[in-house]
Each structure stands twice: as C-alpha cells, then as structure tokens.
Image (spheres, rainbow, N blue to C red):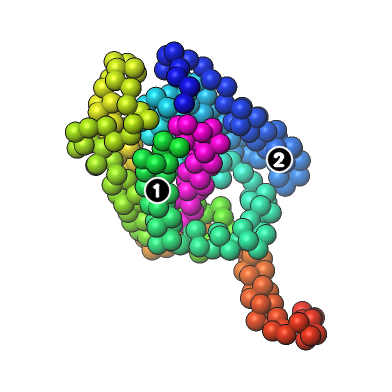
Amino acid sequence: MTALAHPLDWQLNIFWTVAIPALLVAYVVATRSGENRPSRRQRVFFVLAIVALVVAFMWPLGDLAARWSLLALVAQRLLLMLAVPPLLVAATPRPIIVRLTRPAAVDAVLRQAVKPVPAVLFVTVVAVGTLTTGLVSLAAHSAVARVVTQLVVLLSGFVLWAPVLTELPGAKPLSAIGRGAYLIVQSIVPSFLSVVWIFARRPLYRSYDHHGAVLGMSAVLDQQLAGFLAKLCTIAVLWTVAFTLMTRAHVRGGADEDPEPLLWSDVEREIQRADRRALRARRPSSPDAPPYDPLH
C-alpha cells in the first residue's frame, strides 16, 4: 500500500465519481415524462440520496474510510445501509420500480428479500463478513475490492429495508407490529460486532492502526468510537422508524390492520409469478418432447 502523507490527502475515487453523476442523469431521463414523473417529495428524497452518496464516498469521509479510520468506515457503511436505500426507493416512481423488478431473476431475489428471516440472515452475513480482518485489509489495499465491498454493503441496505418498504410490487406487507419487531431485530443481531470493538483492548485491524494520525486518536479509541457509532446509530434509526410505524397504526385504529391498498402492479406481479410457476411445472423433462404452449 502506498503511504499517504496525511489522512486528509485527497484521492480520486474513479468509480463513484462516474457512478453518482450517471445515477443522477439516469434518474432525470427516466422520470422526465408521463407516469414516471416524480412528485416534489420524491425529488427531495432523490437529492438527499445523492447527497448521502457524495458524503459517503467523496473527500474527506471516503478517503478516511478507505485506509485511515474505522470510525469513518462505519459512518460510511451506516449511510450506505440506513440512508441511501430507503431514500432511493422512496424517490423512484412506482412504474419504474415495477419495471426494474420485473425480470424473473430480480423478482426471485425480491421475493426472498421481503421475508424477515432471510433479510436478517443476509444482512448479518454481509455486516459481519465484510468486516473480517482479511476483507478489510484487502479493501484497504485494493480499490477494486473496496468498490465491490461497498456495492455489497449497499445491496444489503436494500435487503434490510425490503420487508418494511411498501413500494415494492408483489410484496406481502407485514403488520405494523411485524415491521416494528423486524426492525428491532435488525438493530441488534447484525451489529453485535460493535460490542467486540468497544471492549477490545488492542486494535483489531492493522489497516487502521495509525496511532494519532486522525485527530490525535489512538487506533483503540478510533475502534471504540466506531463501535459506539455503529450500535447507537443503528438503534436510533431503526427503533425510531419502528416506533413511528406502530404509533401510526395505533392512531389509525389497530396495529394489525393493513392500511396499504391493493394496487394493480401487485396483482400483475402475482399473475406473472403464477405464469412462471406454471411454465416450470409444464416444462418438458425430455429434450425431444414438444415445447410447452401457454395458450393450451
């Protein structure tokens, strides 16, 4: 790894310098007319998502997170998991979400992601697996590995919020109590590694062992602050959303009610899934058998 003169030295992040403007252009082009036109609120959400991405990947946080500070890395990951995914989904008009999730492979992933148990397992594996000492060291030394890790973490953020978001077509909505309980579990299980950081008496990551380099902090203090930030921010965000969901349901007259209306996109998605199941069931087992005709 090439040594940098100072933690606040600016380094060009080629991938995200291209990806963020490309996302902005794609959104403007996709939403410029017809039923895809976003509301004012959706535009605000999209701007906030772009701001969160810029803060996460550009100077100074992005450069500090790359190889200098575990605290900065945790702050970056919190933005990618807790802020960017729900903002992007809320900013995207439903017709576009329907088209993006229509392919069979994407829809198959979506069907599992909206289930609480698979979502908790996936987020836990990503949250812990991408913070093993080996992968953190690899990401600190390799820009490609760092970008891949960041994309996986961003994907896990979408999975984290999938059981809660109502914009996803064909997703059976949980009750308010169910969504609240799910978020509380997500705030506890994947972040248990932060407890290890808080009580560890030595640096666990050699890649971030730069004594006094960042604001005069020792590597152990940086690690402990990262643990507190991860635990407290995760609990604060997810518990606030859980409390809000359950409170709103109570005000409407019952937490077990399903306040979300049934939309045609949900019905259409279930029809498409039924057609795929029927096609798989009737697919000929022998290559010499006649092809399946869905009209008969």
Residue 11 position, x and y percent, is 53, 20
Q: Which residue is at 51% across, 28% downward? A: 57
Which labelled disc corresponds to residue 129? 1
Residue 101: x and y in percent read: 63, 56
Q: Which residues are magenta?
A: 139-163
Q: Which mark is residue 31?
A: 2
Q: Main secondary structure of the magenta part?
A: helix
Identify which residue, 288 or 240, lies in the foreground. Answer: 288
The residue under the point 72% across, 41% down is 30
Magenta span has 101?
no
What residue sits 62% from the left and 44% below the top? 92
Q: Is residue 181 above or below residue 4?
A: below
21 or 9, nearer to the observer: 9
Seen in the image, is 275 located left or right of residue 155? right
Residue furthest front as drawn? 1
The location of residue 295, given as percent across then percent down, is 80, 81
The answer, for residue 5, to whether it is visible in the render is yes
Nearer the observer, 225 or 66:
66
